[in-house]
Amino acid sequence: MNEQEKQPRFIAMIGVVALIVAVVILVFFGIGYLFGRTYL
């Protein structure tokens, strides 16, 4: 596998990781928001 073939997979992997991070942040933000609305 040469350098040119490796590049798109690397970019796709970064995209998947960024998507997972964004979803986790949104989930925790949502939990915090609901917790705050319920108990404060």
Image (cartoon, rainbow, N blue to C red):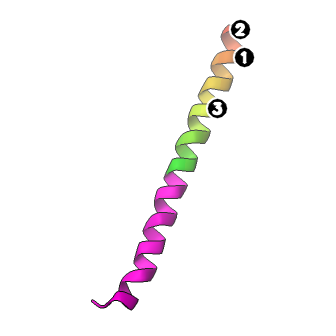
**Whether residue 13 is situated above or below residue 6 in the rendered picture:** above
- Disc 1 to disc 2, C-alpha distance: 6 Å
In the image, residue 7 sits, relative to residue 35, either above or below, namely below
State the residue at coordinates (41%, 73%): 10
Could you tell me if the residues under marks 1 and 2 are in contact, i.e. CB atoms within 8 Å? yes
Residue of label 3: 30
State how far apart marks 2 and 3 are (Cα). 15 Å
Instruction: Identify which residue is drawn at 66% across, 8% down.
Output: 39
Classify mark 2: helix, strand or loop. Answer: loop
In this picture, residue 30 sits left or right of residue 37: left
- Quickly name the residue at label 1: 37
Lower sequence index among marks 2 and 3: 3
In the rendered image of this protein, does residue 26 appear above or below residue 17? above
**Horizontal arrangement in the rendering, residue 39 relative to residue 13 (left or right):** right
* Picture quadrant where residue 4 is located: bottom left
Element on which disc 3 rests:
helix
Label 3 environment density (alpha carbons within 10 Å; few <14, some 14–19, many ≥20)? few
Q: Which residues are magenta?
A: 1-20
**Percent position (x, y) of residue 30?**
64, 32
**Between 13 and 2, which is closer to the camera in this rendering?**
2
Disc 1 residue type?
Answer: Arg
Q: Name the residue beneath numbered marker 2.
A: 40
Query: In the image, what residue occupies the spot 68% across and 13% down?
Result: 38
Amino acid on which disc 2 is placed: Leu
Q: Position of residue 21 (x, y in %)?
A: 51, 48
Task: Please name whichever residue, 20 or 10, is drawn nearer the observer in this view of the structure.
Answer: 10
Residue drawn at x 35%, y 88% is 3
Disc 3 residue type (three-letter): Gly
Decide whether the magenta segment is chiefly helix, strand or loop: helix
Res 9 label: none
